[in-house]
Every structure is written in structure tokens, then in C-alpha cells.
Amino acid sequence: MLIRRLLWPSVVDLTEVEKCPACYGVSLCPAVTRGLITLHPFGTATGLLNMLGSKNVLFGMLGSQKVVLKKLGNAEELEQLDKVICDNTDLGSSCHVNEAVWKQGDLLQSMREHVASQDGSLFLCPAVANLEHLFSNVFDKNKDISTKVLHANIWTSVMINPEPLLLQVLQEQDGWPVAKYVGACGRVVVEEYAGEMLTSYHNAPWLQRAYFAYQLLIAAHNFTDSHPYFGFYLTDMSADNIAVDAQGRLRFVDLENVIVLDRNVPDEDKPLSWNIPHVSESFDCNGCFAFSAADICSHSRSDHNFYAVCQHLLGPQAAPAIIPGGLLHDTPPAHASILELVQECSEPMNSSGRFRAAQDLTALLAKVLRQHSFTAASGAPLIFSLSLAQKCRRDKITLQTMQLIMKHGCTVVAHKTKQQSPQWKTFAPPVPKPKVILIAQDCQLKKYCAPCIYED
């Protein structure tokens, strides 16, 4: 009976809701209490890993929806947080985490200190004054919760794993290539199941892998440039942290380790090298992912995400134990120029080479996919996006990009409302199938413009 309980834990027991507000939130607790969230059967090996505390990710169902339940940390990490909370009080052996969390002092200041350190999972730089601005979506979505309780919830996530916070900052419904955040109950967060890992597609047809490569480059640009205030640099961009959904779209499902670069810091906080783009150094270390957080934070823009995609996912230098030969292994000889651009993106010959190579590689992959009329497995049209970070007004989108739109045989659609059921307005006439949709989101209503296809 004990073994069964360890292998098939109760969702209620997993939540540790009695420790709230030192938890991730309670939005899904009614669903848990009513038994609407059930664990999906999993194998003995997975259960044993969970029992040993080395893995706290479980699969389940929320009604008819496939979901992933995450504790966000292993048993030791969660116990260490409880110890820190109690050690900061004078409650001694009678300490209860739900009471002791109120004795931690200024939780917002504690968060600022934590994200200012490179030792944590979330590193905000070069200054932390805009931390509340970073989490504005979280505050907006939780207005029914007292500020004091919400600060405790956010503080807990910051201390353990910032993923649920970042999933609310970079929301899937806004077009970000991430898993959809469903909610939390106690020390469990629930995310929508995003699909099989990218590693499962290592031997998929080359065109399908080329489509994934294209999406990875789009994602690299999005994380770097699409948010109006912050750049997001993923420091664990591994093929086993990326899922492929039923429509063939990539979803980043592990956002634990991220450098968030505040691009709107006051002049006095800007390093001397701020206006010079940062170039990531390539390291010959057999697939290791080496980077300098200090260097990334010293510039307003870094090529880190492109470096991560090209060096550690697409090319032959990718981690051999995870994706041997890289995602674009066995590229047909007719497309050898793609591998040349991957190499230039991985190890550029000059300081601006990686940005340019990534740009050219994105355009070339788009061209190849169009030539082969490739569509995702679902039959949906390919989605290409135009770099409009500096052209956010809709009139500029219409006037300045029409030539490029028609050149690529694309249509442009702009998001016109924040309503739950989005309405779309077409600015260019439809083209015969297979068509390419060029998404240009309206910055007057959306928080960012979606990048990026580049002119040949």
C-alpha cells in the first residue's frame, strides 16, 4: 500500500496547501478539492524517480484536458525553503511555514535581492528596480488576491522556480512559444500538456526538422526582441526542454533558468558597453552550454539566444547525448548552404556575423519550406512573422511592409482586440493555398510585435 501511494500520489497530498501563502497560489484548489484533476497512469520507473525526489513532474487530466503537474523543485529544495523560512523567525520547533512566511520582512525587497544575484534561477539585470513591472501581468491576473498574499506567492516561486511567473509574463495566448499556464494549488502548478519532446523528432523527415529549425530561430528573435521592455535569454535551451504540439508548433516547457535583461534602465544604470551588441563566445567543450551572464547584462542586446539555437540545437556541435549531430543532421546536399549558415551562426567570423547569419538562415529556411509547400502535420498554413519591433503603429505596418508582403506572397493580419475571441483584419488580399500567413500584431493593443521574416 505504501509503494502504491508513492507511485500514485494523491493530488491533494501533492499540493501541500497547508503551507500557503508560502506556495504558488490557490486558483486551482477548487478543482483539486472536487477531484477534477486526476493523475495519468505512469510507469514504475517514473514513479520511483518521483519517490526518490529526483523528479517532481507528473502528468494528469483536468477534465478532458491533458495537463502537467509540477512541484517546481525536488523534495530537498522544497524542504530547504521551509528551513530558510523558519530559520528567519524565533518560532523554533513550533514553526509553521504558513505563519512564519509573514515574519520574513519585506518580501518584495527579498525578491529584489534574490533576482539581483546570479546564484538564482531568475536573474534580472542590469538593475532590479523594474521587478514589479516585469510581473505586471501576474498582478493584473490576481487582483482578487490581497497584495500581501500575492507577494508571498510570487516570493515562493522566485525562491524555488520562476517558471509559473514567466509563463504569465510571456503568455501562450499572446503568441509566445511556451506552454500555457493553467493555474496553481499550493505547491503544485498546472500547465497544459504541450506534446512530445523535440528529442523524439530527431529522426523525423528533414523538411519537418527544417520547420522546427525555422521556429527555433523565430523563438530566439521573439525572446530577444519582442517584449517592449525586457529581453529574455534562456540559459538551458535544450532539446529535452522543448515540446512539439499537435499542430507541429514548438513550445518551450522549462523556463526555470532565464536571464531577464531590462532594456529600459535609467542612464545611470547603463554599463559603458550598453549600446554595443553583445557577441556570445563559442566554447569548444563537447556540447556544454557555456555563457557569461555578466557579459549579457552589460549590453542592451545579445546574440545569446541565436548562439544557443545554432550551436546547441541545430548544428553538429549540439549535445551528443541529447540530439546527436544536431537537429539538421543529414541535410540534403542541395541545401548545403543551410549548413554553412548554421556554422556561421555558431562560430561567426566577425562581431555582427551571428545576427546576420541567423537572419539569412531564417529567410533561407522559409524559402525552402515554401518551395516544398511544406505545411504542419495538421494541414494548417505555415506561420511566418515580420520583424516590426520598431514599426508598431498599424499605419506603418500597412505602408512600409506591403512591398515585402506581396514579394513573399503573404497576407498580413493584425490583432484588433483584447477580447477572448480575437477578431482579425486582413490588410493584404488572400493568396492561393498553400498560403503563408504573415502575422503583424498591433502594438497599440498588444504588448509586442511578433518577429521575424527578413528581406532577402
Image (cartoon, rainbow, N blue to C red):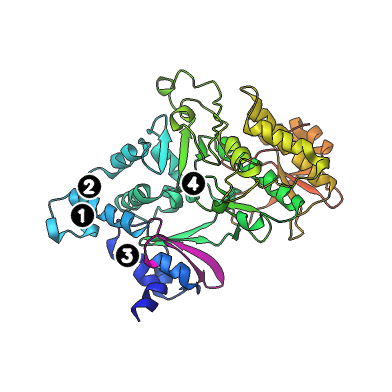
The span from disc 2 to disc 1 (Cα, nearest Å) is: 7 Å
Q: Which amino acid does label 1 sit on?
A: Ala
Residue 231 x/y as whole percent: 52, 36
* Residue 438 higher or lower than 296, as above or below: below
User: How many neighbours does mark 1 have within 10 angstroms: few (below 14), some (14-19), or many (20 or more)?
Assistant: many
Residue 72 is one of the magenta-drawn residues = yes
Residue ID at (68%, 38%): 452
Q: In this view, does 348 lie to the left or right of 289?
A: right
Residue designated by label 1: 100
Residue designated by label 3: 17
The span from disc 2 to disc 3 (Cα, nearest Å) is: 19 Å
Residue 312 x/y as whole percent: 59, 41
Q: Give the range drawn in magenta.
A: 51-73
Residue designated by label 2: 104
The answer to whether marks 2 and 1 mark residues whose Cβ atoms lie closer than 8 Å is yes
Q: What residue type is labelled 2?
A: Gln
Q: Taking the image as drawn, is residue 395 in sight?
A: no
Q: Quadrant of the N terminus?
A: bottom left
Judged from the image, the secondary structure of the residue bearing numbered disc 4 is helix
Q: Which circle marks residue 247 in the picture?
A: none
Judged from the image, the secondary structure of the residue bearing numbered disc 1 is helix
